[in-house]
Image (cartoon, coloured by chain):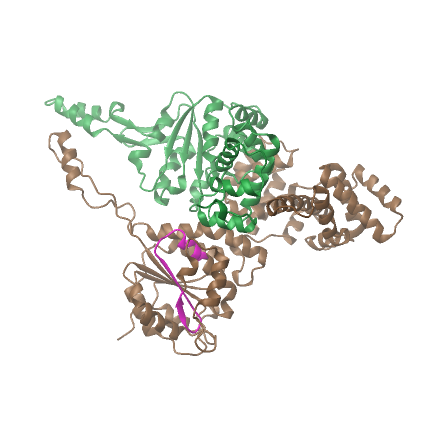
């Protein structure tokens, strides 16, 4: 892949232009990935913008996004390629009496190949962004499917031979760390740990995503969320929940975030009743009056 | 640079971070695309290429600071200013440090990095009492400087400056505290960096790194963990429990599809003119595992019990059928204290207050506890349940109750035993581990997170046949 950027700062600027605010580390890792032709493995808690990074990259570089959503039970036929049985069968039936050699060569040709995301990304004429989402949901055994694609950007179809990428795609894998990924997979990737954003960055994200929000309120929201994240919870508020919360506050016309307005809107930020109670206890908020 | 890099990689490996050859080469290649004059840029590059596990970042950062975070000349121009400050104060020890503290607080609040560094350099000059050539990690120097600067006073000063006043709401107070802590943390970081820089200038990076190595969380001994370490460990437990839960609920055989789906196969065959070309399978049925945890919570097991309970608590929030039993010399069900709606520490307190765990003298009695389990809760164990027992098997020379454990293990799908004692102490003194271990499918020494992780990885593997007691 040709390096589309001259410096990490350029990566940052382009991503910012499409509404994704990378920190210096993200920018550097993306820059490296492009320079070294290596996939990025983004790992971190849910809702910190791992998938959004791939979407933003696709938008910033104006490349098509090919997405492979992983789930337990995903197999070759759904990730790489599949032969189109029906079409092959029709071909056979329509051609009865023809020489076998001819037909055999024919039905295992590209016309009968169903492309799945990985093959699609490899064979694309234009460079693409390949997003392999939630790779930790795959079984360890299935992970091996990805290895060939990740290290040499090629797919081997036994009947057709090896297909190598015309243009190397930029690959982003995401993981919520529900299990340890295999060494083999990690070794092939640049590792990008995406933690919850710092207060400054979250404030900047709020400013970009909810521009109508007054600066002072954004600051208070970012600080409050950061304080809440320091409390051990079942599900800490993610960035998208922070944004939802900011929008809620804005929509309700709350001008200053005090105890009362915080406790009445806490359910936007936290999704478990126990978490809400926990936070209320820690911050001495009175939530009872808001519970019907 | 390559030289330093290879030293750095060696240091990472020494700590226990697995860095492969390929990754080291990647790092070297990536350096060509890195702005070496910017330490944070370099940190991002090396972090992304060498360290592939979020838990290793703390150790990585510490080592990185030693190798690359240094400012080589400790006499920066600012140091002159600082010396001037010192003279102005006139050498009187107490006042002198007060002035320095105030100046530092001001620099922190204004976010003036250069001034802060200068002041810290001055503080180190004056208070650290560093002796060249001593093989130390510098933690004592840091402590000495912080004590002389009176860190509590400094914190109070910062709080006041940030607008601390009575009548602040709890939320505002918390935000303020976080803010103040953040600033003090910056001071600590800068101070450590300064001292590290001087140590490195004195003895070289590899040496210093070796004397201030941070062990990885997964290698922390759970029986003797400090409070901070326990917090880190507890944070790492939730993902582990999730993994254990998935492992246990994974279908038994990998790759196998479910049973043949006759209806779908026939329907599908219609498009091939009725030829049964493509067999269709039902999606594999997932087993819904039932977990039964039995925890020794006696005094000798206190630290470990807290940790196992935390694990259990985390599992309970992943799987619906988890029953928890705690025992000392009596056994009681404590599931209700660890439900998904209950805060962990509250549950622990309630359990110790209300559960009926002590029948006689409060020393572990496994025999009696297994008997209780079989007699009272035997029905809870079915062919779907996985029994996890945690304890050191130190039975105080009492009846072992193997016949009860045997019956429990026989009825269960699998029985695991996690023992926090090192293997070499098993069967010494009053430990009767081997009497129990033959009855279990899998027995594991679990003293560190890493060992627990290994157990989790193996939990769903084909079981070894357990021995049956001759009846």
Above or below, B253 relative to B50: below
**Chain drawn brown in the picture:** B
Can you give x and y, in whole percent of width and height, for residue B101 in the image? Answer: 78, 47
Q: In the drawing, does residue A94 fall left or right of residue B412?
A: left
Q: Classify the position of the C terminus of chain B by image quarter.
A: bottom left
Above or below, A205 relative to A270: above
Can you give x and y, in whole percent of width and height, for residue A229 in the image? Answer: 54, 45
Colour seen for chain A: green
Q: In the drawing, does residue A26 fall left or right of residue B38?
A: left
Above or below, B294 relative to A226: below
The reply to whether residue A29 is in sight is yes
Does residue B325 show up magenta in the picture? yes
- Which of A120 and B263 lies nearest the eye of the viewer? B263
Q: In the drawing, does residue B462 fall left or right of residue A229?
A: left
Does residue A200 show up magenta in the picture? no
Can you give x and y, in whole percent of width and height, for residue B226 in the image? Answer: 58, 59
Q: Which residues are magenta?
A: B311-333
């Amino acid at each position: 892949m040709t390096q589309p950027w001259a410096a990490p700062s350029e990566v940052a600027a382009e991503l910012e232009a499409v509404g994704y605010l990378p920190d210096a580390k993200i920018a550097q890792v993306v820059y490296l990935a492009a320079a070294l032709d290596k996939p990025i493995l983004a790992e971190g808690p849910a809702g910190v913008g791992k998938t959004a990074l791939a979407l933003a990259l696709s938008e910033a570089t104006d490349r098509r996004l090919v997405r492979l959503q992983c789930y337990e039970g995903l197999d070759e036929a759904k990730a790489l390629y599949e032969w189109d049985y029906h079409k092959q069968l029709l071909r056979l039936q329509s051609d009865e009496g023809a020489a076998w050699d001819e037909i055999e060569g024919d039905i295992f040709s590209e016309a009968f190949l169903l492309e799945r995301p990985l093959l699609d990304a490899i064979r694309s004429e234009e460079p693409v962004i390949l997003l392999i989402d939630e790779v930790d949901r795959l079984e360890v055994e299935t992970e091996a499917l990805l290895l060939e694609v990740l290290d040499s950007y090629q797919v081997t179809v036994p009947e057709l031979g090896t297909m190598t990428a015309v243009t190397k795609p930029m690959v982003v894998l995401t993981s919520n760390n529900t299990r340890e990924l295999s060494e083999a997979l990690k070794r092939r990737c640049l590792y990008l740990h995406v933690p919850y954003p710092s207060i400054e960055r979250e404030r900047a994200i709020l400013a970009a995503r909810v521009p109508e929000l007054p600066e002072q309120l954004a600051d208070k929201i970012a600080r409050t969320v950061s304080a809440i994240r320091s409390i051990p919870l079942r599900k800490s508020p993610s960035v998208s929940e922070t944004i939802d919360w900011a929008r809620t506050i804005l929509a309700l016309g709350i001008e200053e975030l005090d105890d009362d307005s915080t406790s009445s809107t806490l359910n936007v930020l936290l999704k478990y009743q126990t978490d809400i109670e926990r936070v209320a206890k820690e911050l001495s908020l009175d939530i009872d009056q808001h519970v019907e | 640079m390559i030289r330093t890099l290879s030293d750095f990689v060696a240091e990472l490996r020494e700590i226990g971070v697995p860095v492969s050859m390929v990754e080291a080469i990647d790092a070297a290649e990536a350096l060509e695309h890195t702005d070496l004059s910017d330490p944070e840029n370099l940190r991002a590059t090396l972090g992304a290429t060498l360290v592939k596990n979020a838990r290793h970042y703390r150790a990585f950062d510490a080592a990185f600071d030693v190798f690359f975070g240094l400012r080589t000349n400790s006499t920066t121009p600012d140091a002159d200013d600082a010396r001037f400050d010192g003279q102005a104060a006139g050498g009187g020890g107490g006042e002198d440090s007060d002035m320095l503290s105030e100046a530092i607080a001001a620099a922190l609040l204004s976010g003036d990095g250069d001034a802060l560094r200068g002041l810290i350099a001055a503080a180190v000059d004056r208070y650290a009492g560093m002796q060249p050539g001593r093989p130390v990690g510098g933690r004592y120097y840091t402590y000495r400087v912080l004590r002389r600067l009176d860190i509590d006073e400094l914190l109070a000063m910062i709080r006041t400056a940030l607008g601390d006043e009575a009548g602040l709401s709890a939320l505002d107070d918390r935000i303020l505290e976080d803010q103040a802590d953040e600033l003090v943390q910056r001071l600590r970081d800068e101070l450590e960096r300064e001292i590290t820089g001087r140590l490195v200038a004195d003895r070289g990076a590899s040496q210093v790194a070796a004397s201030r190595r941070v062990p990885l969380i997964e290698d922390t001994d759970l029986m003797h963990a400090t409070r901070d370490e326990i917090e880190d460990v507890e944070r790492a437990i939730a993902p582990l429990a999730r993994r254990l839960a998935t492992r246990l609920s994974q279908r038994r055989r990998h790759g196998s599809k479910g049973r043949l789906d006759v209806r779908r196969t026939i329907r599908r065959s219609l498009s091939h003119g009725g030829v049964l070309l493509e067999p269709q399978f039902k999606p594999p049925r997932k087993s819904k595992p039932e977990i039964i945890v039995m925890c020794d919570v006696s005094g000798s097991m206190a630290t470990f019990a807290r940790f196992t309970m935390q694990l259990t608590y985390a599992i309970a929030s992943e799987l619906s059928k988890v029953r928890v039993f705690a025992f000392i010399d009596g056994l009681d069900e404590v599931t209700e204290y660890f439900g998904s709606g209950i805060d962990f520490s509250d549950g622990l307190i309630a359990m110790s207050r209300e559960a009926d765990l002590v029948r006689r003298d409060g020393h572990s009695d496994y025999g009696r506890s297994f008997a209780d389990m079989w007699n009272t809760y035997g029905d809870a164990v079915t062919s779907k349940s996985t029994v996890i027992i945690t304890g050191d098997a130190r039975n105080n020379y009492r009846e072992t109750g193997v016949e009860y454990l045997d019956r429990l293990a026989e009825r269960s799908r699998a029985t695991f035993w996690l023992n926090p004692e090192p293997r070499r102490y098993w069967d010494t003194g009053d430990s009767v581990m081997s009497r129990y271990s033959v009855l279990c499918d899998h027995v594991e020494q679990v003293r560190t997170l890493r060992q627990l992780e290994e157990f989790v990885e193996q939990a769903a593997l084909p079981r070894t046949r357990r021995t049956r007691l001759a009846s």
